[in-house]
Amino acid sequence: MKFFAFHLMPWDRLPDDFEQNYKTAWTWLPNEIFDPQHGGELYNNYLDQLVLADELGFDGVCVNEHHQNAYGTMPSPNLMASILARQTKNCKIAVVGNAIPFYDPPTRCAEEFAMIDCISGGRLIAGLVVGGGPEYYSFSKNPTFAREMYREAFDLIMRAWTEPGPFEHYGKHWKLKYVNPWPRPIQQPHPPIWIPGAGSRETIQFVAERRFAYMGIPYFHMDFFQRNFDMFRDACEKCDYTADPEQLGWLLPIYTAETDEQAWAEYEPHLWYFVKKLLKGLVVFPPGYTSARSIAGIQKGLQQFMSTCETREDIEAGGYAIVGSPDTVRQKLSERIKKLGVGNLLGLFQLGTLPHDLTCKSMKLFAEKVMPGLREELNATIAS
């Protein structure tokens, strides 16, 4: 069982009148709201939190890519990963992931990931993603071609890592006379591949066919995750192998304090800032982004989250976040991880406006009083 600290690096100072006067935290939110001085403080605090995760014994840290929004102010996760490659010593560095349809050409992703792998001594986990729906608005890209661009970019990156160069690539979306990337990654034939998804059947099938790892993104009911992970396992069986728990990851917010009541008192205001403000107006799937069947199922799951989460009880009932004392957090995670059958837990330890001191306190409590016993218990379950 592996434990990761995942970070969105959100903006924590949206205007007080945001809910009344702004339609979204994405794409169209005026960038004059961003204060560069405060942004610098946030970036350094967020990096310190991920370095702390390495010091506390987490198996890995995760960064990801979003553009033109307050939800995740990390347009270049590779830049953050390169800093972490120098500042951490032991943990894996998971970039989950690069939105490769936007890399022109995609060999830039292959080059940058190889640099991070070299600097870190072979600790990179490479996430290769289609890109979130809002990003297609931010880059004025036609989402109708998202999947075919992704597949071409993905195959090109794999070739760049596994075939001697130079070679030629003449595809529909990119034409390259010379593909000969320097440097090459330490990990051979390539770094481990993680592909996150929200339940798209196309993504699940794509990952299963290639025997990579599938990461379930948050904001969905436990039952939704169960269906998706079962769908992934079924897809693996149809490809003539049994999915390993290490091929599945579950991402969710986690907060630990001395008691259940203290945990909720400290965490709840920051959780609602995240739900009510940072997720407001999220356009997840523009037309053509994926199949109509997949969009219908995913939108139904998101609507369940956005329309029913009004109280602490709603959060707990849906398993949207795990909040409580070390004993409570360990018990709930144990039950749900065993049920879901995942081998990677990606904890979102900083959320919304949660300040640096509370984030670090929660991470330390989790690492000292939850993670060791939970790891031992779950490893024994997996072994049996």
Image (spheres, rainbow, N blue to C red):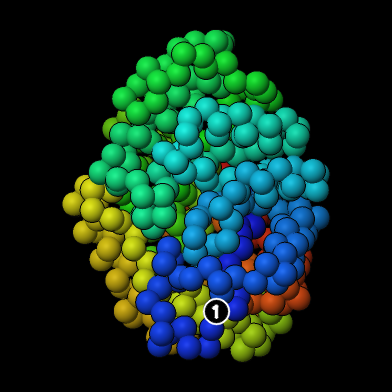
Residue at the image point whose x is 74% and y is 47% from the top: 83
Q: Is residue 314 visible?
A: no
Residue corresponding to mark 1 = 14
Q: Secondary structure at mark 1?
A: loop
Query: 374 or 166: nearer the eye?
Result: 166
Residue at the image point whose x is 36% and y is 50% from the top: 140
Q: Position of residue 296 (x, y in %)?
A: 21, 59
Q: Looking at the image, which residue sits at the far left?
A: 292
Query: 379 or 280: nearer the eye?
Result: 280
Residue at the image point whose x is 28% and y is 39% from the top: 145
Query: 6 or 263: nearer the eye?
Result: 6
Quick check: 293 above or below 221? above
Query: What's the amino acid at mark 1?
Result: Leu
Residue at the image point whose x is 65% and y is 21% from the top: 182
Quadrant in the picture for the C terminus: top right
Q: Is residue 18 left or right of residue 226?
A: right
Q: Is residue 78 visible?
A: yes
Q: Position of residue 75 (x, y in %)?
A: 56, 53
